[in-house]
Image (tube, grey):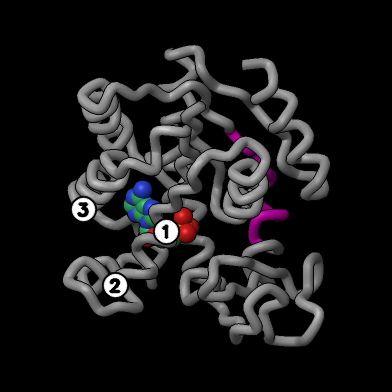
Amino acid sequence: MNIVLLGPPGSGKGTQAKMIAEKYGVVHISTGDILRENVRNGTDLGKEAKTYMDAGKLVPDELLINIIKDRLAKPDVTGGYMLDGYPRTTPQAEAMDKILPELGQKIDVVVNIDVPDDELVKRLSGRRMCKCGVSYHLKFNPPKKEGICDVCGGELYHRDDDKEEAVLNRLEVYKTQTQPLIDYYNKAGIIADINGAGEIPEIFDEIAASLDKL
Ligand code: AMP
């Protein structure tokens, strides 16, 4: 099963992606995580991507298309995967539609998580991350010990792009660049719409119910 997860920043995509990957045994591919790792390691890609990311802007399509092309050609994807954060623009979706048949793959479902804007701003501004990929929220999902990851003991940080101005920018970018993909995949008849405004386990149940139907 190959899944695309679509939803605005703060919709809980990353959290749900981890839960889905665990239950269905698919590989979790987050382009945001791949980019952040490149930034941490100071690679050429990381250096180029960082300014866009810090401002809450999208990294240019050609870089992302190359990332996804390489990632989907790796052998671990044959048991199925979940794309979290890709595609984010129509050219990225079109490029993937060309790449997939060459790899003998297709997308089975696009899970579209919908959350109202005011809720998104609240969630993102309180979010804290660990470099192991786990995320927390100061109010809704705090770590057991302040500032420390429950899973790996690492120090939590506030992503530059989770600060208020960048958050507003990311929401705007989502509306103009990514939302048109809902239409794109609706035309293909593969969208599952999920109400992402509730609690994490309920949202997961709703997603699982639509995946179990496939
Ligand atoms: P995320 O962790 O998915 O919220 O991604 C963090 C940041 O990485 C985004 O705000 C973008 O700057 C960049 N990014 C991740 N995925 C993409 C993509 N598919 N296209 C363009 N930029 C991306």
Taking 40 as reference, is 63 left or right? Answer: left
Tell me if residue 115 is in the magenta stretch.
yes
**What amino acid is labelled 1 in the image?**
Gly
Q: Earlier in the sequence, mark 3 or mark 1?
A: 1
| Quarter assignment of residue 209 | top right
Instruction: Provide the residue designation for mark 1.
Output: 32
User: Are discs 2 and 3 less than 8 Å apart at CB?
Assistant: no
Quadrant of the picture in which ligand 1 is shown? bottom left
| Quarter assignment of residue 104 | top left
| Label 1 neighbour load within 10 Å: few <14, some 14-19, many 20+ | some
Q: Earlier in the sequence, mark 1 or mark 2?
A: 1
Where is residue 114 shown, x and y percent of the image? 65, 38
Q: Residue at x 52, y 24 (%)?
A: 109
Instruction: Provide the residue designation for mark 2.
Output: 51
On residue 60, the disc is none
**What amino acid is labelled 2 in the image?**
Thr
- Label 3 sits on a secondary structure element that is helix
| Label 2 neighbour load within 10 Å: few <14, some 14-19, many 20+ | few
Instruction: Provide the residue designation for mark 3.
Output: 63
> Would you place residue 161 above or below residue 82 in this image?
below
Q: Which residues are magenta?
A: 112-121
* Ligand 1 lies under 8 Å from the Cβ of mark 1: yes
* Ligand 1 lies under 8 Å from the Cβ of mark 3: yes
- Label 1 sits on a secondary structure element that is helix
* Ligand 1 lies under 8 Å from the Cβ of mark 2: no
